[in-house]
Amino acid sequence: MDRPVVVELDHVFATYRDLVVLEDVSLKVSRGDFLALIGPNGSGKTTLLKIILGLLRPAAGEVRVFGRAPWRLDGERWRIGYCPQGLSVDLNFPVRAGEAVLMGRYGRIGLMRRPSAADRAAAEQAMQRVGVADLADRPIARLSGGQRQRVFLARALAAQPELLLLDEPTTGVDVAATDSLYELLRGLHQTGITIVVVSHDVGVVASYVDGVACLNRRLVAHGRPEEVFASDALEQMYGCDAMLFHHGRVPHMVVEKK
Amino acid sequence: MEILHYAFMQRALVAGALIGAVCAVVGVYVVLRGLSFVGAGIAHASFGGVALGFLLGVNPVLTAVAFCLAIAWGIGFVARKGQVREDTAIGVFFASSMALGILFIGLMHGYNVDLFGYLFGSILAVTAQDLWITLGLGVTVLLVVGLFYKELMFVAFDPEMAQVTGVPAAKLYFLLLSLVALTVVLSIKVVGIVLVSALIVTPAAAAYQLSEDFRRMMALAVLIGVASAVGGLLLSYPLNTASGATIVLLATLIFFVSALVSPRRRRRRAAPR
């Protein structure tokens, strides 16, 4: 374990109004990790991401990203790439995909400066990497759900981040597109990017990542996928019997409702 | 077109064209960020500032600038704190500053001020000094938008993402509110307090119907804003109508036509907002 720690949470608590959303969460993400953060709705997954991003501050506990409090990253914010849930913006906003991807670099470019040729090249390269280079001139209102998700991923990659955070990247995307998105993430991971993906697709995610963290307000389990799924973590988390079975290449999870 | 020979009409046209352009440019960001009601709130609040100027015997534009900036920041501060909803904050601020304006006017001994002109706009009221003030403020607003063009667009599109990538979203929100305040003040003389917000919102809203590209929306909004202002001024003279009302109704007409021919109408999607 001599890889540098990229994200470190130390006994983190978070509250929303009077509710405790995260309780005593300690988690380390090292450089080169590919971690899936799974858990039921309302388990605090998005809150955890927002804490790492510096959008929310913990009620108690320590957070460090690249060795600093995330809200003090200032000029180094671009080292974190973020791909939010696809439905968080006005999809009728008049902007073309290429311009939306270039926005990912605005923070790195700085105020009052115009994007340079190098910035445009980086945005273009990010689009090629996720296979949407041909959509650059397409208004975002005219993209399909899967295409839009890839454009947002390209935007997150445009600033050439070292850490990539994704929030439910496959919401509203069909099975084939889900698979190819995870293939893409695997490829990015192999180039050395640290990835944390929040996901519902417990089964799909398991065959791609090298670590799983199960969250249900508390961190229920954290380890290699096979260890986590062999334990009773899922049962604890969903409060019911859950099992995985393998159908073809993709493992599926069956949850029995009580 | 002999009216073009009159100095007051020349001044009004120059001021009108600039106002149409500045309102449209700021309006694009206002419409895309969903701040239309903020524009209306700041505009009505300017009444208090104008009245204060008359009471103190200084140029009402100066007091209106200070007043509108204070109200804009007040709305922004309360809204960001999240204790009170934005629309509630606007409701409280704009009613109270109008009430303050009425109070100020009551305190004046015998009022012979052309309040109607301030409320609804009047081309006859544009003095040479007003024109210089409009030019100065207008160029300032356009310059600031030019400097922060890309960040203002990003924050309008996806404020959370902008913040995450290191764009100072909170500061830009206050910058936009300040730009709205200045735009309101520079437009008052020609369009009037009651109607300024329409000239900010309507050309941008019409351009939105016809654009799937940011630059295009900006260019179309300016075109529609300038055409409405100049067209409205030229029509208001022979029709003997209030200039502000004529300008705004012309812009509204363009808005309805745009909405009818809009490609968005044929391809309606659920817009989560």
Image (cartoon, coloured by chain):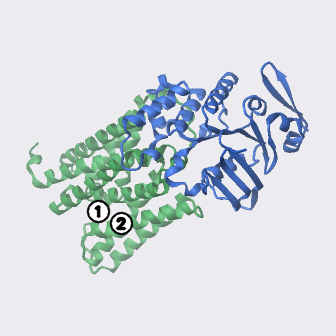
Q: Does dot 1 land on a helix, a strand or a loop?
A: helix
| Chain letter for the part of the structure drawn in green | B
Q: Which residue is mark 2?
A: B47
Image vertical order of residue A212 relative to residue B138, above or below:
above
Q: Residue at x 27, y 66 (%)?
A: B61
Circles 2, 1 touching at the beta carbon (< 8 Å) = yes
Q: Are marks 2 and 1 on the same chain?
A: yes
Left or right: B194 in relation to A92 = left
Q: Residue A103: image x %, image y %?
A: 46, 40
Could you tell me how far apart the alpha carbons at marks 2 and 1 are, in whole angstroms? 8 Å
Q: Quadrant of the N terminus of chain A?
A: top right
Which chain is mark 1 on?
B
Which chain is mark 2 on?
B
| Chain letter for the part of the structure drawn in blue | A
For badge 2, the amino acid type reads Phe
Residue situated furthest top in the rendering: A248
Q: Residue B125: image x %, image y %?
A: 20, 60
**Front-lying residue, A83 or B203:** A83
Residue A120 lies in what quarter of the image? top left
Image vertical order of residue B86 relative to residue B56, above or below:
above
Left or right: B189 in relation to B95 = left
Q: Does dot 2 land on a helix, a strand or a loop?
A: helix
- Numbered circle sitting on residue A176: none
